[in-house]
Each structure stands twice: as structure tokens, then as C-alpha cells.
Amino acid sequence: MSIVLVGSTSGSITLQEPAVSGSTILSLPAVSGTLITTGSSGQSIPKAALPTGSVLQVVYGSTTTQTEASFSSATDLGLSASITPSSASNKILVLVSANGLGSRGSDWNGWVVRGSTNIGGFGNYISSNLTTSGFWGASVCILDSPATTSSTTYKLQGQRQTGSSNCIFNISTGSSGTGTISTITLLEIAA
């Protein structure tokens, strides 16, 4: 036997028993809440119902563009990604992996910027103590609290701190001229 629930203004919901033998019990919770249903696209759980620490969305950005400059002032290195948090209380986990080449005699710093705010980075990843030019790779992991639901852009910047040698970001490697890749990944984490 089916049970029909009639809507207060229009429509209805029919609870249809399965065509199986025996008894089946469906226990409804004694508290207010939202039932998870399956539809044509599978299960759908509202983001607000997910527990603290859940990953709500992931945004990825990358660049293979080679850039060479003295970077005597803070310079955008062409690596960025934007994310729109679903709640102002959520956090953004920022993961950056950067590649390049630094020349002997210069120290370089790199950092992640949210809008115009430096939220952290890595320093002196090419040392003035090098006797020759050398490749470098740097990574950083930052848990940020942007406190907004507006689209927010995170980008990598760099600057020479000492010396006068240029920095080459994403320098081509090998005889084929294959470029390296630098990446940024943004994960929204439920608060």
C-alpha cells in the first residue's frame, strides 16, 4: 500500500513500498534535518551539511611560461588561480609548487599574495653562496582565512633580495626545450 503526502499548497509525495517479501523498516530521525536523496545525477549533499574539514571545492592553476627578469621589485610570476568561497568562515588551503633557475650571486624570495596581501612564502631559495647557476624548486602550503564569499585571487610573486643576477622562472630544460611547470592548487575547507 502506498502513502501519499499532499503538499500544503499543491503537489504531493508518494511513498511507494518495494516489491519484496518480508518486512522493511525505515526509521525517520526525531530531529529536524535534510534527507539525502538520489536523483538522475546521484546523491546530492548540501555543502552546509558537510562536517568541518571537508573539501568543498578544488581550483587548479598552472603556467609553463618562461620569464626572465631582474625582479628588483615585487613581480607577478604569472602563476595564479581564483576561488569563490561558499562561506566567509571557510578556509582556503593554498598549495604552490614553483620551478625556475637562479644565477650565482643573488638571493631570491617568493611569496603568495591574496589580492594585495602577502600571506606567506619561501625566502632565499637561491643562495649567494652558489658557485654556479643552479636550478631551484620551491613549494609552500598555507591555510588562509580570506573571510569573504567574493571571488578571491591567489598569485605567486618574486623579488631579488641581494645581488644583481636575473631570475629565470620556468626555464626550459633539456635539448628539446621542454618547459617546466609551476602549479597552484586552492582547496576550500569547511570551517
Image (cartoon, rainbow, N blue to C red):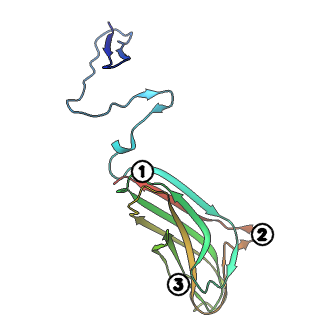
Quarter of the C terminus within the rendering: bottom left
Question: With respect to residue 121, does 128 lie above or below?
Answer: below
Say which quarter of the image contains residue 80.
Answer: bottom right
Residue 86 — which label? 1
Three-letter amino acid code at the position of disc 1:
Ser
Three-letter amino acid code at the position of disc 3:
Asn
**Residue for badge 3:** 124
Q: Which percent across, then down, holds residue 100? A: 64, 75
Question: With respect to residue 185, does 56 lie above or below?
Answer: above
Three-letter amino acid code at the position of disc 2:
Gly
Label located before the other in sequence (2 or 3): 3
Compared across the picture, whether 143 is left or right of 41 comes to: left
Q: Secondary structure at mark 1?
A: loop
Quarter of the N terminus within the rendering: top left
Q: Residue at x 26, y 18 (%)?
A: 25
The Cα atoms of the two marked residues, 3 and 1, are separated by 36 Å
**Residue for badge 2:** 177
